[in-house]
Image (cartoon, rainbow, N blue to C red):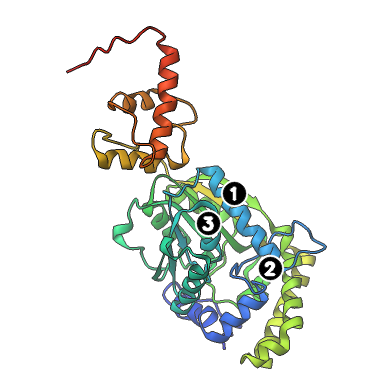
Amino acid sequence: MADFVGKQFSKDEVAEHVLEQYDQEHTRIFYQCVMGGGGHDIHFGLFKNPATDGVYESSKHTTDFMCHSMDWAAPVTKDSRVLDLGSGHGGGTHAMVTKFGCSVDCFNLGPEQNAMNMEECKKLGIADRVTTHVGNLNNPLPAEWTNRFDFVWSCEVFCHAGDKVALLKEINRVLKPGGVLVFSDLMGADHAKEDQLRSFTDRNSTTVMGRPKNYLEAIKESGLNYMMWWDGSHHLEQYFRCMVSQIDKNYDEMKKQGLTDQYLKNWHQSLSDRAETQKLTGVFAWGVFLARKGGSPPLPSFDPTTLEGVKELNDYLADKTYITGTQASKDDLTVFCTMSAQPNESLYPHAARWFKHITGLTSSSFPGTCLGVTSK
């Protein structure tokens, strides 16, 4: 069973130990119980209600916070394509697809975790919006993914990356112009020395842990534009203690499912030490970063003189009032002027709704009587 006492790994070594830590049956059981509270959000949590929230509720709050942060950075729509980097059990993916209707590519080292993810997607009725890929984030991402994604999401995965600048450069490559990265990670505080983080690194397959200031520098070096660093480090001590409580509450059940006394006791001691260390020294940091790729997303292009073009226009307007922006513009007029009649309302309801709205606006702007002049 995973035990990394006194060990940190190189970029080339870390992947096999990540599999050992997360993708064996007993470790999946442990993380889903102790860190996910039985759910699929296997990451640190935000305590909106500190007196009542446990690991399950606080982990859900983190997922919700990251979804909202991403959506404020750029609107997430059903047409958005998201890369969930290090998707694990899929909690972030499930939330994004359910909330926004977007499509998600899950890139993850563990095939068994991917299977758990897709099983839950089928239960939620979202499997048609999710694709899983097995891959190692310490290697380059697929070449064909250049400029593919509107968003990249990653939750506490970068601590397993041997070269964080190289990873951020790869993310920059696969984002579309104007695309957004949102990620969280457990780090050492800026003042922390590596040996002070042993209560984490002895139980987790890591390279050298990141620091907030180092991530800010790495974002800049990667070519991404920094947007936000939200520091949630003050939630860590309570989360560590909640994980200890989960072990206590579920000890016998986890033993029945094959976890050993030694494994559970090692984790219990490590998490207890981690909570006390954080209380006394604050050497761990955790929070959420936002960054954006430079440039602007490509503008939409339609040919509504064809049925295929009308369908594309209809699909595009499903969650929009105007072609671009939040008020009528020359972009609307450009498309409108190519159309000879309102689209069929039963077949193309969104395009028809937009056409009627723009018709009303143009009528009020040009109040004179139309005599039916045509152009050739």
Residue type, label 1: His
- CA gap, disc 1 and disc 2: 19 Å
What is the crowding at mark 1: few (fewer than 14 residues within 10 Å), some, or many (at least 20)? some
SS of the residue under disc 3: helix
Residue 56 badge? 2
Q: Is residue 369 above or below residue 33?
A: above
> Which residue appears farthest toward the top when viewing the image?
368
Q: Can residue 286 be seen in this view?
A: no
Q: Position of residue 74 (x, y in %)?
A: 50, 43
Displayed quadrant of residue 267: bottom right
Residue at numbered disc 1: 68
Query: Quarter of the image containing the C terminus?
Result: top left
Mark 1 falls on what kind of element? Answer: helix
Q: Distance between the residues labelled 1 and 3?
A: 10 Å
**In the depicted structure, whether residue 144 falls above or below residue 220:** below
Which amino acid is tagged 3?
Met
Q: What element carries label 2?
A: helix
- Amino acid type, label 2: Tyr
Q: State which quadrant residue 242 falls in.
A: bottom right
The foreground one among 161 and 72 is 72
* Residue carrying label 3: 96
- Specify the quadrant that holds the N terminus: bottom right
